[in-house]
Amino acid sequence: MTTATDDDDASWLQSVLNSHRPEPGPVSGRWALGVGDMIANHSLTPRKLGGLLRRLNYFGGVAISEDAVEFDGDDVKWADVEEIRTRSLIEYMFTGGLDSQIDKLPLPWFPFRRHVIGAISRAALTLLLAAAKQQLEGGAMDIRIPAEVHYRGMLRSRELTPGMLAAVILADPAVRACFEATAEAHGVSVTPAEDDVMEDADERAEQIKSMLAKLQDRLHQ
C-alpha cells in the first residue's frame, strides 16, 4: 500500500516526465532527461543550484542524439550499435535488482540530498510498480523497454543496459517511440529478447507478485 507521500512524489515525477517528452519521430539534435533535471525540478532544491545539479544527469538518465544513445552517463555511437533488444517492464524489474538501487544513487553531496534522492527513488519505484501491477493484472498493454543495446567494443560485442531511473524514463511511450524511431533511422533493429521470462508469465505470476510485494515493502523502510 502506497502512502500519500509516495503518491505525491510519483505525481511530481510523472509531471517532470510529461513536461520533458521528446518530439515524435527520430530525434533532431539531442534529447536528454536525467536525475539532475529531476533534482533541479524538486521543490526542496534551491533554484540557484539548478544549472549545477543538472550536471548530475551523468549518474542516471537517458540521452538520445543523432550520433549516440546514452544510459546513465555511458554512451554508444549509433554506428557501433549492432542491435537493440526489448524486455517486458515486469521482467526488467524481476531481473534488474531494482531493490538494490533504491536510495543508493552514487551522487555527491548537495543541500537536501538525502530527502531529494529518497523522494526520487520512491517516486521512480512507485511508477514502476504501478505500471507492472497494471500489466500483471491485465489492465494495461505489455510495456517493453529497450533494455539491451548490443554494440561493437574494442575486442568483442558489449551491452549497454539502463538503471532504475533510465528504465522509468524509457517506459514513457513518447521516449520509447523516439528511441525506436531514432534507432530505425540508423538502420538498427529493435527486437524482443528471445529469453524473455514473461513468455511464461502464467507460471511465473506468483513469483513475480512476491517480488513486487518485496519492492513495495522497500518503499516503507
Image: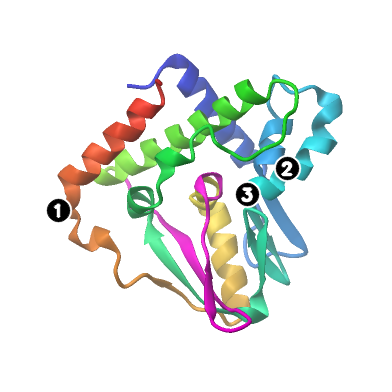
**Image quadrant in which the N terminus is located:** top left
Mark 2 or mark 3, earlier in chain: 2
Residue occupied by mark 1: 202
Q: Residue at x 35, y 34 (%)?
A: 215
Mark 2 touching mark 3, by CB under 8 A? no
Q: Label 3's element?
A: strand
Give the quarter of the image for residue 191: bottom left
CA neighbours of label 2 inside 10 A, class few (<14), some (14 to 19), many (20+): many
Q: Nearer the viewer, residue 155 or 68?
A: 155
Q: Label 2's element?
A: helix
Q: Is residue 58 visible?
A: yes
Q: CA distance from mark 1 to mark 2?
A: 40 Å
Q: Report the mark closest to the observer, 1 or 2.
A: 2
What's the mark number on residue 133? none
Residue occupied by mark 3: 61
The vertical placement of 29 against 163, above or below, is: below
Q: CA distance from mark 2 to mark 3?
A: 9 Å
- Range covered by the magenta-colored residues: 140-166
Q: Residue at x 30, y 39 (%)?
A: 133
Q: Amino acid at mark 3?
A: Gly
Q: Label 1's element?
A: helix
Q: Residue at x 63, y 82 (%)?
A: 154
